[in-house]
Image: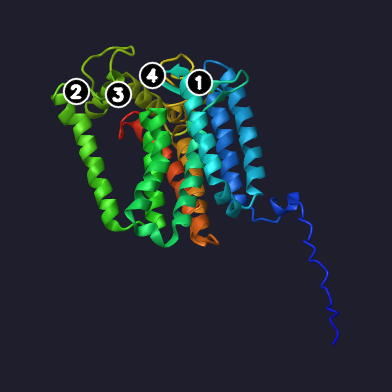
Amino acid sequence: MSTDRSIAPPRMRAPRRRRALSDVVDLRLPFDPVLAFAAIALTVASVVTLDGAQSASYVTRQALYGVLGIGIAVVVSRFDYARWPRYRWGLYGFMIASILAVAALGQSVNGSTLSLNLGFFSFQASELGKVLAAVVGASFIVMRGHAVSSWRTTLGLLLIVLLPAALTRDFGTSLVYAAMALSLLLIGGTPGRHLAVIGVSALVVIVSVLGVLPAAGVDVLKPYQVDRFTAFLSPGGTSEAVDGNDPTYQLRQSKAAIGSGGKTGKGDEATQQKLGFLPESETDFVFASAGERFGFVGVAAILSLFALIMWRGLRILSTARDFYGAVLAAGILAMLLFQVLVNAGMNVGIMPITGI
């Protein structure tokens, strides 16, 4: 009897293929020309609006930021978003570290430390954090899968999105993060009872901060924040002061700038911004600057461009190829929409003044 046995050759492990750039970047991904047109048109409008600023440096910086932003958008659009969830915790760690670095080393402007001066530009970690929070929050919801209706998922998402907001310690920025968290919860399928509890809790906090605690001698809001709420509730003001000592000064100057623009605007003859009557005309009150410079027609065109972006965003949300894409689109769309509504609203007096 033969004892010879055939010995199978050892299995050779296939060599691991190195990941090529084409595995990450796909130049064939869809491109939305309408969305691109709206973004570029708004960038141009922002540069023209700032052309009337007291310092020409604002125009140069805005133009450079606009070109840089469009370039980054083109590059990022060629990356498949489906790969982003695998890097979620690395992105989140980078976001938190950036916000903490700005808080420790950044420059304070109007009571808020939101930017870090890097010499050639100011880095605002909270702005980048808004996008990264949407990416990480959407990833968290999708990864939870069937457990999306649990309180653990709801509270986990709130912690992920609202922690960077708390670290910034800025009221306006926190509102944007809160709006984004709400949109992620809604699109993510959070049960109605969870949303009801969150709504009631938020109402209790608001009433406590604005009424109960101040009545008990505990001041939660800073003096300038109290002044802003006072200006919103009593826009007529308590004095005829012509400087920043009147809480309603900013709002009155904003309304004056918008009203003086009329139908078609003053163009280069706009004075509220050039002469410094309109405070923060390049940032918080840029909508009023646009109103004076372009008038009702110009402002309507700008809002129409934002509406165009919102429409394309809703279309992306409704036609996304997967759940993660829809939730991510909802978060970014809510972030943009809320900022537009608050900035325009506070410039005309229908919302309290916040630094958005």
Amino acid type, mark 2? Val
Q: Which residue is mark 2?
A: 218
Q: Is residue 254 left or right of residue 238?
A: right
Residue positioned most to the front: 1
Q: Secondary structure at mark 4?
A: loop
Q: Earlier in the sequence, mark 4 or mark 2?
A: 4
Q: Residue at x 35, y 51 (%)?
A: 152
Q: Earlier in the sequence, mark 4 or mark 3?
A: 4
Q: Is residue 133 left or right of residue 226?
A: right
Residue positioned most to the left: 216
Q: CA distance from mark 1 to mark 3?
A: 33 Å
Mark 1 closeness class: few <14, some 14–19, many ≥20 residues within 10 Å? few
State which mark lies toward you, 1 or 3.
3
Q: Earlier in the sequence, mark 1 or mark 3?
A: 3
Q: CA distance from mark 1 to mark 4?
A: 33 Å
Q: Earlier in the sequence, mark 1 or mark 2?
A: 2
Amino acid type, mark 1? Glu
